[in-house]
Amino acid sequence: MTVWIAVLATAAGCYLLKLLGLCVPARLLDRPAVRTFATLAPVALLAALTAQQTLVHGHLLTADARLAGLAAAALALWRRAPFLVVVLAAVAATALVRLA
């Protein structure tokens, strides 16, 4: 039963946080610093999540096949490849490293 209490409390907290965001005055949202933060924060959070999922196994920092896949994807993005090519390059690099 305590799991459901935690789930319901988390859902209520998320809803209240969303509601709080809707109550922010428009003049605050029009500031350049707030706009810059709103533009850059999702990119930074996604980059941090990608790095954490790629480089951490348990509580240890590791460099395994996932890192090769990330490097291949980064190279494909740098070369301005289409998204499907980026994904396929990452999959292929990861698979090749795991086979070796």
Image (spheres, rainbow, N blue to C red):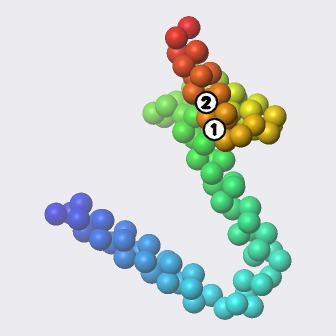
The count of marks equals 2
Q: Residue at x 80, y 39 (%)?
A: 80
- The answer to whether residue 70 of the structure is visible from this angle is no
Q: Residue at x 57, y 89 (%)?
A: 23
In the rendering, which numbered label is found on residue 64? none
- The amino acid on which the numbered mark 1 sits, given as a three-letter code, is Leu
User: Can you say whether 99 is above or below 10 in the image?
Assistant: above
Q: Foreground residue, 89 or 32?
A: 89
Residue 77: image x %, image y %?
Answer: 75, 38
Q: Quadrant of residue 13?
A: bottom left
Q: Are marks 2 and 1 in contact (CB under 8 Å)?
A: yes
Q: Foreground residue, 70 or 79?
A: 79
Q: Residue at x 16, y 63 (%)?
A: 1
Q: Quadrant of residue 45?
A: bottom right
- The answer to whether residue 20 of the structure is visible from this angle is yes
Q: Quadrant of residue 29?
A: bottom right
Q: Residues within 10 Å of mark 2 (few under 14, many from 20)?
A: some
* Image side of residue 29 versus residue 23, left or right: right
Residue beneath label 2, please?
A: 88
Q: CA distance from mark 2 to mark 1?
A: 6 Å
Q: Residue at x 69, y 54 (%)?
A: 44
- The amino acid on which the numbered mark 2 sits, given as a three-letter code, is Leu
Residue 76: image x %, image y %?
Answer: 74, 33
Give the SS element for disc 2: helix
Residue beneath label 1, please?
A: 84
* Image side of residue 33 versus residue 48, left or right: right
Extreme top residue here?
100
Q: Residues within 10 Å of mark 1 (few under 14, many from 20)?
A: few
Residue 72: image x %, image y %?
Answer: 69, 27
Give the SS element for disc 1: helix
Q: Quadrant of the C terminus?
A: top right
